[in-house]
Image (cartoon, rainbow, N blue to C red):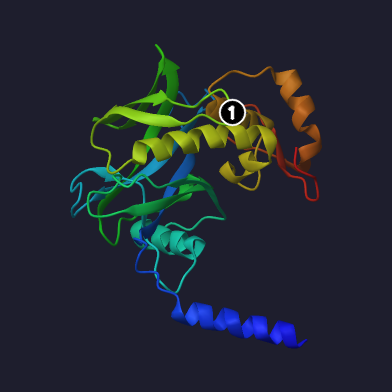
Amino acid sequence: MKKRVDTIKENEEFVKNYDDSKYKKPSVTADIVIFGMFDSEENNYRKLSQKELKVLLIQRDQGPFEGCYALPGGFVRSNETIVDAAKRELGEETHVQCDFLEQFGTYSDPKRDPRRWVISNGFMALMDAGSINLQAGDDASDAKWFDVSFEEAENEWKLQLSHGEEKIFARLKNIASRWDVKQKFESVESNDIAFDHQIIIADAIMQLRKWINETHIAFRLLPEKFTFRELQQIYETVLDTELLVPAFRRKMAFLVEDTGEVSGDAGHRPAVLYRERDGVDEI
């Protein structure tokens, strides 16, 4: 017992006298990639609307990168965790609340922020965004949903973000080695994107595609009640591929339950409404 007491005292003395001035201290931020799923606008009311994946960007109203678009986020305060900071920044910059917020990456390039060494933690937020009332706040002059596309072409990856006439693009190179468990990107060219947020967005898209195949994450992009077709559209939109209806229904059948209700969209054949089944283990 005496040895344990002595060890505790020694540790307390070590911490009291410890000099950490020889280590440079980075600032820490949280940046949030907010994905929303929207119904496309169709002029023909008899045609079923398609799903569109969008990412939320804010326009910076101060330097650095004033006028450029960036992910919602900000610095972690001394009295909060990184997760707390992500939740706070999400509310302050967009006035958006969501039920899904998950960390997926850390970004520590000493040159990623021109002000000083800043380590950022990437978070992903998901929501069925059709009913969201979007507002810009804090240090954002504007907040907008951008259509998002990310695909490989000619040994490069191309990220395209668009909102009406506004077009943002980035070219990235995959620098992962054969031993890496996931792809790693390096920016080749970009326009109107602040910091290294094109890389964070690219990583988030790849992580979303992975998670949608391994978890029940797709339900976070849907309202509480949905049709089987809407569920399949979520997968097809995120994975950017068409899926065979019979095979998809077999795979998803045990994850959903019939609500006993049907959709009432005018001009469309009524479809059964489902909800996520409770108590089912992850895929």
Q: Which residue is mark 1?
A: 233
Q: Quadrant of the C terminus?
A: top right
Q: Is residue 279 left or right of residue 97?
A: right
Query: Could you tell me which residue is drawn at 49 percent across and 27 percent down?
Result: 176
- Residue 43 in view here: no
Percent across and percent down for residue 151 are 44, 21
Q: Quadrant of the N terminus?
A: bottom right
As helix, strand or loop, the secondary structure at mark 1 comes to helix
- Residue 66 in view here: yes
Query: Could you tell me which residue is drawn at 34 percent across and 69 percent down?
Result: 21
Q: Which amino acid type is marked by label 1?
A: Gln
Percent across and percent down for residue 6 are 66, 85
Q: Identify which residue, 272 or 110, lies in the foreground.
A: 110
Q: Identify which residue, 254 or 93, lies in the foreground.
A: 93
Q: Is residue 281 left or right of residue 198?
A: right
Query: Could you tell me which residue is drawn at 47 percent across and 42 percent down?
Result: 35
- Label 1 neighbourhood size at 10 Å, few (<14), some (14-19), many (20+)? many
Percent across and percent down for residue 26 are 35, 59
Res. 55 image quadrant:
top left
Q: Identify which residue, 133 or 241, lies in the foreground.
A: 241
